[in-house]
Image (cartoon, helix red, strand yellow):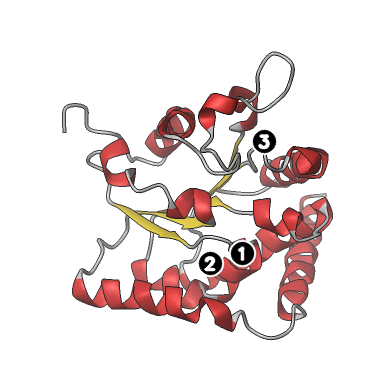
Amino acid sequence: MKRLTWLACLLTSLVALAITHADGAPPSHWQPDIAAFEASDHTHPPAQHGVLFIGSSSIQFWKSLAQDFPGIPVINRGFGGSALTDSTYYADRIVWPYKPSLIVMYAGDNDINEGATSNRVLASFQSFVARAREGVPGVPIVYVSIKPSLARLALWPTMKAANDKIRDWAATQRSIRFVDVAPAMLDAQGKPRPELFRPDGLHMQPAGYALWIAALKPVLADYGFVVKHGA
C-alpha cells in the first residue's frame, strides 16, 4: 500500500510538471521584476537558509515582513499579478540561490481570476513544490490559502475548492503545510470583512496581515523559526 501511495504521488508530480512545461512561452514580461531581485541580491545579499516568502501581490505588498517576524531572516520575493506558474518558472533565480530552510507561498488568486480551475491550481502548486525541491531538496513549504476578497467574491467558490484540494494533498505529503487564513477573514455571514481590505477590495490593510501573522507564527516556530519578542 505504501508503495502504491508513493507511486501515485510521483505520478501526480510528473503530471504537474508536464502541465507547467505545456504552458507555452516563458513569462518574459516578468523579466524586469526578476532582474530587479537579482540586482538587489548582488547589492545586498540576503541571508542564506532563512524563510522565503514568495508569490503574488499579497506577498509583494507585505513590506513589514522583517518587523512582523523579528529575529527571523526573511526574504520577500513577491511580484504583483503573478501566477503560481511564474514562481515555478523563475525558481532557479528567486528560490534556489537563497537555499531557504522554509518557503511560505501565497499564489493562486490570480490564476483563478485568469480562468484556472481548482484542479489546475492544485497541479500548479504541485509543480512549484517539485521545481523548488530540484534546487533545494526537501525544503518545507507552507501554502497560505487563497484569501476571500471583496473584489473577487464571485470567484470564492472556485478558490475555496482549490484550497480544499491543496489542503487534502498537503496532508499526504512530507513537509508541506496548509495554513487556512480564510475563516478569520470572513464575517458571521461568510462574507469578506471590509475592514481588512484597501479601497480596491483586493489587497490588504495591516489588519489583514495581522491575521496572517497570527496564523503563521506557530507554523514557523514548528520549523525552528521563533519570533524574538522585544527585538
- Of discs 3 and 2, which sits in the foreground? 3
Q: Is residue 9 among the parts visible in the rendering?
A: no
Which of the marked residues, 3 or 1, is nearer the chain's N terminus?
1
Q: Secondary structure at mark 3?
A: loop
Q: Are marks 3 and 2 in contact (CB under 8 Å)?
A: no
The residues bearing labels 2 and 1 have C-alpha atoms spaced at a distance of: 6 Å
**Front residue (pair 173, 157):** 157
Say the numbered circle drawn on residue 132. 2
Disc 1 marks which amino acid? Answer: Phe
Asked if 61 appears above or below 18 in the picture, the reply is above
Asked if 213 appears above or below 189 in the picture, the reply is below
Left or right: 51 as drawn, with respect to 10: left
**Front residue (pair 21, 148):** 148
* Quadrant of the rendered image containing residue 50: bottom left
Say the numbered circle drawn on residue 150. 3
Left or right: 179 as drawn, with respect to 7: left
Which of the marked residues, 3 or 2, is nearer the chain's N terminus?
2
Question: What number of labels is visible?
Answer: 3
According to the picture, the residue beneath numbered tag 1 turns out to be: 128
Query: What residue appears at the point 49 percent right and 66 percent down from the top-left corner?
Result: 137
Query: What residue appears at the point 54 percent right and 43 percent down from the top-left corner?
Result: 203
The residues bearing labels 3 and 2 have C-alpha atoms spaced at a distance of: 32 Å
Asked if 10 appears above or below 145 in the picture, the reply is below
Q: Are marks 2 and 1 in contact (CB under 8 Å)?
A: yes
Q: Secondary structure at mark 1?
A: helix
Q: Position of residue 102 (x, y in %)?
A: 43, 52
Disc 3 marks which amino acid? Answer: Leu
Mark 1 Cα shell of 10 Å, populated few (<14), some (14-19), many (≥20): many
Q: Position of residue 90 (x, y in %)?
A: 52, 75
Mark 2 Cα shell of 10 Å, populated few (<14), some (14-19), many (≥20): many
